[in-house]
Amino acid sequence: MELRQMRYFVEVADALSFTRAAERLHMSQPPVSRQIARLEEEIGAALFHRTKQSVALTEAGRAFYDQARATLASAQAALTAARRAAAGHVGRLALGFGGLSAYWWPQVMAEFRARSPSVELVLHPLQLAHQRAALLEDRIDVGMVVLPLEHADLAAERFRCEPLWVALPEGHALAAHRSLSLSQLADCDFVMVPWTRGHGFGRLTMRICSRAGFVPRVVQEAEPMESVVGMVGAGVGLAIVPAIVSQLPVSRVVYRPIRERYARAEIGIAWSKGNHSPVLKHFVDVARRVVRAHARQDVG
């Protein structure tokens, strides 16, 4: 017994005409009649009373009709479910969501949920510096990283470019300037996220200060970035932070842009190359659309 035989049977039963059923199926009548005959042979009973003037369901036909419709509906539901799964519209996705990534993920998540409300998003509260390790340990499916990523088992795409600013205690001598050069920070005390572990803004700060010709004098490490800014407000030292951090309502802290063009953070979305989940692929595609939309807005 084949699904197409059931489909032909249901069409004939609904139309009570082999000719009209064949028209609805966009085929000629003889193949429809042959398949119905084979179906009746397999069942061992006639499904239709046929005369030259009319077609009517037999008792066996009426009993078979409801089950045939239910079977076809179930098959269609299975087909739809398989297609949705293959397209990444059902399933589960573990997302690194913590620290500064919590500022940047929401638009992607909103777009993704609008397209795939049946996918369960599982959020893992991880600082940006630790999402790389979580990806390698398969604790998350997708995360955010500071580029370059530099790991053969991970793939990454640029998500955004974030200018770096200086967070200063209110009243600091350098706060009198509208913008600052990195060289002006060489003799200052620094607060920063830990740079010897993790792969986040701590290492980036060390890298850009080295390019400016000095090693920052770190007097305090803190995590997350909100704690770094809090320590700045307490007068412990200054910090190099992404520009988005200036939106934090922290008292006694002022922010100044850095003049050097290389003082920027390239932020990427990253995932394991061995993860072939359709849900992951769909999520990355949505993130790409968000990036393109931002690019168009910037051009406009």
Image (tube, rainbow, N blue to C red):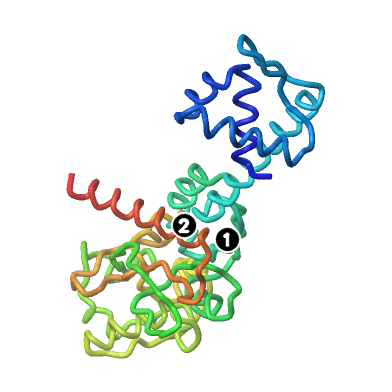
User: Residue 57's quadrant in the figure?
Assistant: top right
Return the residue nearer the eye: 14 or 172. 14
Q: Residue at x 27, y 70 (%)?
A: 264
SS class, disc 2: helix
- Please provide percent x and percent y for residue 209: 28, 84
Return the residue nearer the eye: 65 or 163. 65
Q: Residue at x 23, y 48 (%)?
A: 296
| Dot placed on the residue nearer the N-terminal end, 1 or 2 | 1
| For residue 269, above or below residue 121 | below
Q: Residue at x 37, y 88 (%)?
A: 217
Q: Would residue 144 appear left or right of 69 to someone viewing this image?
A: left
Q: Residue furthest top?
A: 53
- Please provide percent x and percent y for residue 137: 58, 80
Residue at label 1? 93
- Residue type highlighted by circle 2: Phe
Badge number at residue 283: 2
